Image (cartoon, rainbow, N blue to C red):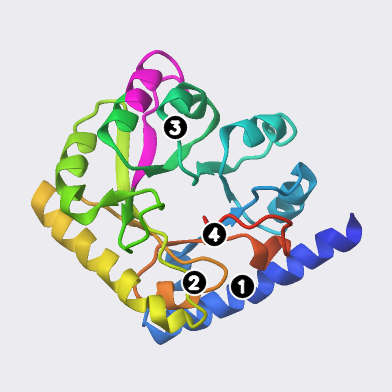
């Protein structure tokens, strides 16, 4: 475990250095970029090691997997993100387990989450923070709302009493050259700017960029990057939410 903890600390330092250089190239402060450590498929010990290294935001893909780990890290003062696709029938469980749901892609799901919070499914007196996942590529199998439907969905989600809409998230197509995904990140930033004007409220969070391409994402305005393998090492199964 000591070796694993050391490796996570060293990996994180490298990620932070690369993030700082990318922010510098864009004239930004790296302190404005949050690293969400994607801990899916990794054991709770790895989460604790990453927490000890200084990370405070963690992303999981599946409700059931997080349920199996949550009790072992419940004492940590961290923000727990659901970044994977969420089925409506698991909305109540998700609302009680996560501080953030970063993958809202339909009004039906948003309404389910809103109702779950209203019925005591989240921390008392707190709204559940959410992002809307936007599908920008042509991959029909990928979740996310189409750009043409985003404004209507955002307006409706912003009007739900128990949800706090913070911004947008996207997962671009995987390309060997990270420069190839720059247009997707630039597009999401532009969409966010237009959406802010349309709905008349701030949307401070842009969650985009993963282990493979987060530097380009930072250059294009990402405020959150999702990094899993870059911190924890290679995982046995590949599921592109980071």
Q: In this figure, which residue is indicated by the disc labeled 4?
A: 242
Q: In this figure, which residue is indicated by the disc labeled 3?
A: 87
Q: Which residue lies furthest to the right in this view?
A: 2
Quarter of the image where the N terminus is located? bottom right
CB atoms of marks 4 and 2 within 8 Å: no
Q: Quadrant of residue 136?
A: bottom left
Left or right of 9 in this view: 182: left
Q: Distance between the residues labelled 2 and 3?
A: 27 Å
Q: How far apart are marks 3 and 4 (CA)?
A: 19 Å
- Along the polypeptide, which appears first: circle 4 or circle 1? 1
- Secondary structure of residue under mark 3: loop
Nearer the observer: mark 4 or 1; the answer is 4
Q: In this figure, which residue is indicated by the disc labeled 1?
A: 15
Q: In this figure, which residue is indicated by the disc labeled 2?
A: 214
Q: Distance between the residues labelled 4 and 2?
A: 10 Å
- Along the polypeptide, which appears first: circle 1 or circle 3? 1
Nearer the observer: mark 3 or 4; the answer is 3
């Amino acid at each position: 475990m000591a070796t694993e903890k050391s490796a996570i600390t060293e990996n994180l330092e490298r990620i932070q250095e690369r993030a700082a250089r990318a922010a510098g190239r864009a004239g930004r402060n790296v302190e404005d970029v949050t690293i969400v450590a994607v801990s899916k498929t990794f054991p709770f010990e790895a989460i604790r090691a990453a927490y000890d290294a200084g990370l405070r935001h963690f992303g999981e893909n599946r409700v059931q997997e997080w349920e199996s780990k949550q009790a072992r890290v419940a004492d940590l003062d961290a923000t727990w993100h659901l970044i994977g696709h969420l089925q409506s029938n698991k909305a109540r469980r998700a609302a009680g387990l996560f501080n953030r749901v970063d993958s809202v892609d339909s009004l039906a799901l948003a309404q389910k989450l809103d109702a779950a919070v209203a019925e005591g499914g989240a921390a008392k007196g707190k709204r559940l923070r959410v992002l809307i996942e936007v599908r920008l590529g042509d991959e029909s199998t990928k979740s996310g709302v189409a750009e043409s439907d985003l404004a209507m969905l955002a307006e409706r989600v912003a009007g739900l009493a128990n949800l706090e809409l913070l911004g947008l998230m996207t997962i671009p197509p995987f390309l060997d050259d990270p420069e190839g995904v720059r247009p997707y990140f630039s597009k999401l930033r532009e969409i966010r700017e237009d959406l802010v004007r349309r709905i008349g409220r701030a949307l401070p969070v842009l969650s985009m960029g993963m282990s493979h391409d987060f530097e380009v994402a930072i250059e294009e305005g990402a405020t959150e990057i999702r990094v899993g393998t870059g911190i924890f090492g290679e995982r046995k199964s590949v599921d592109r939410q980071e």
